[in-house]
Each structure stands twice: as C-alpha cells, then as structure tokens.
Image (cartoon, helix red, strand yellow):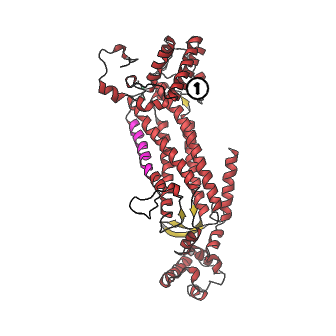
Amino acid sequence: SAAKPWAGRFEQPTDAFVEAFTASVGFDHRLYRQDIAGSIAHARMLAHQGILDADECDAIVAGLTRIGERITAGDFAWSEALEDVHMNIEAALTAEVGDAGKRLHTGRSRNDQVATDIRLWLREEIDALLGGIDALVAALLDLAEREAETIMPGFTHLQVAQPITFGHHMMAWVEMLERDADRFRDCRRRLNVMPLGAAALAGTTYPIDRSFTAAALGFEHAAENSLDAVSDRDFAIEFAAAAAIAMMHLSRCSEELILWSSAQFGFIELSDAYCTGSSIMPQKKNPDVPELVRGKTGRIFGHLMGLLTLMKGQPLAYNKDNQEDKEPLFDTADNLRGALKVFADMMRHVSCNRARMRAAASQGFATATDLADYLVHRGIAFRDAHEIVGKAVAFGIRSGRDLAELSLEELRRFSPAIGEDVYSVLTLEGAVAARNHLGGTAPEQVRAAIARKRRARAET
Ligand code: ARG
C-alpha cells in the first residue's frame, strides 16, 4: 500500500480494516476541483510571500492542473491507503513534479484544507440550486399567467372554503420558493469566509498572507479565528436546513399535485412523461414524480438531523467526526437539485381541467362568506350575518342546492335584507373579483403580482 504522509512516528502498519473504515476518498474525491483550486491559491500565496520559489510554484500549479485534467478524464487511480482526496492529490503531485510537490503542504493542514474545500463546493452548489429554483419559478409564473382567471375551490382543513384562482395558488408556491432562494443566498454569504491559514488549529509560523488567498478563491475575507475556522460545520447545517425547508415546500406542492390529479379531484393532468403505469392494473397512471419528491423529503430532513447531531458533542477544534459531513451534504444537494429540475419540467406540462375546478368550486357553499359580507353591507352585524348564512347553508344542504341555486324568495326567508342584487356576489367570478387588493385572489391582482415578479427578476 502507498506510503502514508503521516507515517513517520508509526511503527506498525494500519490495520487493513481500519484503513478502509477511516478512508473517505470513496466519496470525498468529489471535492477534487475545489481541493486543487485551494492548493493552487495556497501555492501562489506561498510564492508571493517568498516561502516558495517561483519555479517551485510554477511546477506545483502545472502539476495540479494536469492532475485535475486527468481526474476529470477518469484517468486517475484513487488509493484508499491514501485515505482522502487531499492526500491522494498531494501524493500524485509529488509523483508528477518531484520535490516541489512536497513543499505544497507548508503552512497548511488538511483541517483548514477540507474546511475550505467544502465551502467552495457548497458555494457552487448553492449557485446551481438557485438556478434550479429560478427555473421552477419561471415555469410557475407562466402557468399562473395562463390560469390567472381559472376558478378553483380554495381549501382550509381540505374542506371547500372560498373560491380562488389557480393562478393565485401557483403564486403562493412562488412566494415559498423565493424565500427558499433567499435562505440559500443568506447561507452562501455566511459560508463565504476562508479557513486557509488556520492550519491544524492554531495558525502557522510562516509569514502567510491570508487576504491574498481569500481574494484568489473569491472568499469575502479570511476567517477571524483559527480554532473556529477548522472546527465548525454550522454553515453545512445551515445549508441542510435551507434544503430541508425547500424540500418541505416541494413536498407540500407534490401532495397537492397528487390530490389534484386523482380521479376524485380531476383538477389537473400531469403529462404522461412524468407518470408511470402499473404492471398489473392496466388503467393506472401514477404521479410517481411528485410522490418521489415527497418521499425524498424524508432523507433530506434526516441529513439535517444527522449533521446537527454530528456537531453537538464536538470539543474545539477539528475532530475526525467531521469527515461524516460530506455524504449528507452531497446527497442533500443532489436530491434537491434533481427535485427542482424535475418539478420545473413537470410544471411546464401540467394541463388544467378548468371545468372540473369550476364545478368543484360551485359545490360546498364556497360563496357563503360573500353572502355574509353582503349582509354586513346592508347594516347587519357580521356575527348575525354569519348565523343567517349558516341557516341558509343548512337549508341548501337539505334541499341539495348551492346558495346561488336558491330562489330570492327562499333566500329572503333567512333575511329580508337580501335583494335581487345578491346573485352578483353569489357567483364565483364575482366572489373572486371582489378580493381585489394586494395579495388577494382577484385575477387583476394575480396578474399584477406576476408582473411585479417578472420586473424584479429582470432587475437582478
Ligand atoms: N478526510 C478528512 C475530513 O474529511 C480530512 C481532514 C483530516 N484531518 C485529520 N487531521 N485527520 O475531515
């Protein structure tokens, strides 16, 4: 097995099982681009400070660049005996360029190295996730515009509550997703601080220039405290929390899509491309994509809990426990990215059954609140109006008709304040159009909200 860079003080070889048990290269090889970028910046800083010769630095940079190309091309043999991505690349560098490679680790430790790598990686992942959220928001804005006037029942307790528009419902999803994006941006800002220079835990005796390295790697600044820089993974927890909240939102959206595409609701139809059939029941078209997104939410929540628990008992500074941060982060990012992509594509191919939605809204006395408001306009106290309408609803239930289907004479039995003009508030279109203020469900407001979002997007 390959010689370990730390083997000097050891007299016996590592137990073979322990070697496999402690190795992380099987998963952290994924950080190779960030590891190489960090090493190149570190080498350039060392040369700038006169700690490395210029030609040593050039050899290191060229060697690392070649190694990066080989890894990308799949032409690199990872060694478990070399434990992790950092020692694999360093050993390959020394094999590639000789003695200069051995000088790269001057003033550095794997502890500040790995903390830097993950931050660089998360920064890129967050940018990709923000792109994914953006694509989904764009799809929802188009759908909301197309269905700005489509009436559907709004629910509370999953019971018909008041009529709303499908466009308004889609714009609620947009609000949720925009806050998700905001949480990721906030997380990105806090994690964009550079650990390099903290070395193992206390800093280094070389005359390093941490601002030089931070600028080269696009960090806002260097971390203020070396112990904190190598030990805390709060930024990873924050990322996992933002991801868990975003998945919670996608899961709620999924649940609605699943309900709406059932025969009992029949509000929407998902494209065949996003569904699968049953191997036994020939009639089936199952909403697998939203079901799987809802299902994947479980593991994302689990990763958040895993990372919190990973951190809670650790004394300062670095502990090997932290090697366990990577797999949950990778899995979180991969699954959230996938969920966002499939959702954006799927939502572009949703067809709405407007007649079914309208029919559902016209059942369940969705305009009962409007009748109460109508009575209030005629001088009746809201609590009395509520009672009057409740009686009218009970009558409707008994006679199997909605409020708009009762005759004026029947309605007036409940209140003489009711006049011929009541029918304009009992219609679905009237009820929806009347909620015409910022944040309301009126089509005019939905269109205004879409326009505001589009303007804001064009500005950034
Ligand atoms: N593979 C390690 C990790 O992921 C790298 C840092 C190891 N440092 C150490 N002192 N053992 O955290």
The answer to whether the beta carbon of the residue marked 1 is less than 8 Å from any atom of ligand 1 is: no
Q: Judge whether residue 190 can be spotted in this image.
A: no
Please state which of residues 133 and 182 is positioned toward the viewer in this rendering. 133
Q: Amino acid at mark 1?
A: Ala
Quadrant assignment for the C terminus: top right
Q: Judge whether residue 232 can be spotted in this image.
A: yes
Quadrant observed for ligand 1 in the rendered image = top left
Q: Quadrant of residue 351?
A: bottom right
Magenta-drawn stretch contains 104: no
Q: Is residue 211 left or right of residue 263?
A: right
- Residue 289 image offset from top left, x and y in percent: 48, 53
Q: 146 above or below 392?
A: above
- Residue 83 image offset from top left, x and y in percent: 39, 25
Q: 126 above or below 170?
A: above
Q: Quadrant of residue 193?
A: top right
Instruction: Determine the residue positioned at 30% across, 14% down.
Output: 11
Which stretch did the figure color magenta? 295-311
Magenta-drawn stretch contains 304: yes
- Residue 321 image offset from top left, x and y in percent: 38, 32
Instruction: Determine the residue positioned at 31% across, 18% down.
Output: 13
- Residue 64 image offset from top left, x and y in percent: 53, 21
Please state which of residues 364 and 269 is positioned toward the viewer in this rendering. 269
Quadrant assignment for the N terminus: top left
SS at badge 1: helix
Magenta stretch, main secondary structure class: helix
Q: 313 above or below 181?
A: above
Please state which of residues 95 and 399 is positioned toward the viewer in this rendering. 95
Please state the total of marks drawn on the protein image. Answer: 1
According to the picture, the residue beneath numbered tag 1 turns out to be 214
